[in-house]
Amino acid sequence: MTRIIGLTGGIGSGKTTIANHFKTLGIPVYIADDEARKIMQTSVVIDAIKKTFGETLFEGEVLNRDKLAQIVFNDPEKLQQLNEIVHPAVKRHFKQWLLEHKAFPIVVYEAAILFESGSYKDFDVIITVTAPVESRIQRVMTRDKTSREQVLGRINSQWTDEQRVSKSDYVIENIEIENAKRDTENILKILRIKQNEY
């Protein structure tokens, strides 16, 4: 039976870096945000977004993701509407992916809003990646070439580290990357031991 690790953390926490480290350790990883981006280009999802948010967000058939982000990250109701379109589609896609990886004893599902979406209930183990808020802000500003205000808006639309940690089985502090990688490896060792006990 494949055990599913839910890996989460706030924007800029470095959860994708940790997800990639899991990959180097031979663990299949499903990056929900990447898959959601692809799914948002499918005709069914495009039609639903047009119906909900209007055609002004599109240039031809191409969704302007920046415009959409500006709308949803400043309006919790709009964010909820978008999630109701995208999450069920991602969930279906992940089920298919899981079937393709059923030979693996452990897989990782990485998503920013594991708790907010309620999908954390579907996983066997939850790992939260944390980092100081100021570090997160600087990382995202550099990565996305965006303003401090926009990053704070996105941080404030997500759960706090405290909320996430309170519902997690393991926490990886991503301040020094080498320490964070070591913690990842230690957690994986524990999970493999537990897996063998089942």
Image (cartoon, helix red, strand yellow):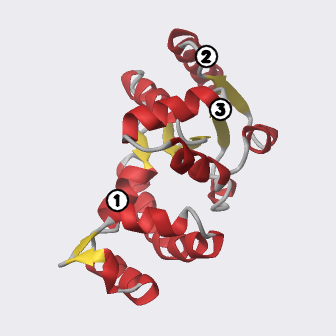
CB contact under 8 Å: marks 3 and 2: no
Q: Amino acid at mark 2?
A: Asp
Q: CA distance from mark 3 to mark 1?
A: 26 Å
Residue 21, numbered circle: none
x then y, percent, for residue 6:
59, 43
Name the amino acid, label 1. Answer: Arg
Q: CA distance from mark 1 to mark 2?
A: 29 Å
Q: At 45% from the left edge and 62% from the top edge, which residue is drawn?
A: 69
In the rendered image, residue 104, in percent from the top left (x then y), is placed at 44, 38
136 sits to left or right of 23: right
The spot of residue 90 in percent (x, y) is 44, 64
Between marks 3 and 2 in the image, the one whose residue lies nearer the viewer: 3
**Badge 3 is on which residue?**
133
Tell me which label, 3 or 1, sits earlier in the chain. Answer: 1
Residue that appears at 72% across and 38% down: 161
> Residue beneath label 1, please?
37
- Coordinates of residue 16 in the picture (x, y in percent): 45, 35
State the SS at label 3.
helix
- Residue 168: in sight, yes or no? yes
Q: Quadrant of residue 73?
A: bottom right
Q: Total of numbered circles in the picture?
A: 3
Q: Specify the quadrant that holds the N terminus.
A: top right
The disc placed on residue 183 is 2
Q: Disc 1 vs disc 2: Cβ atoms closer than 8 Å? A: no
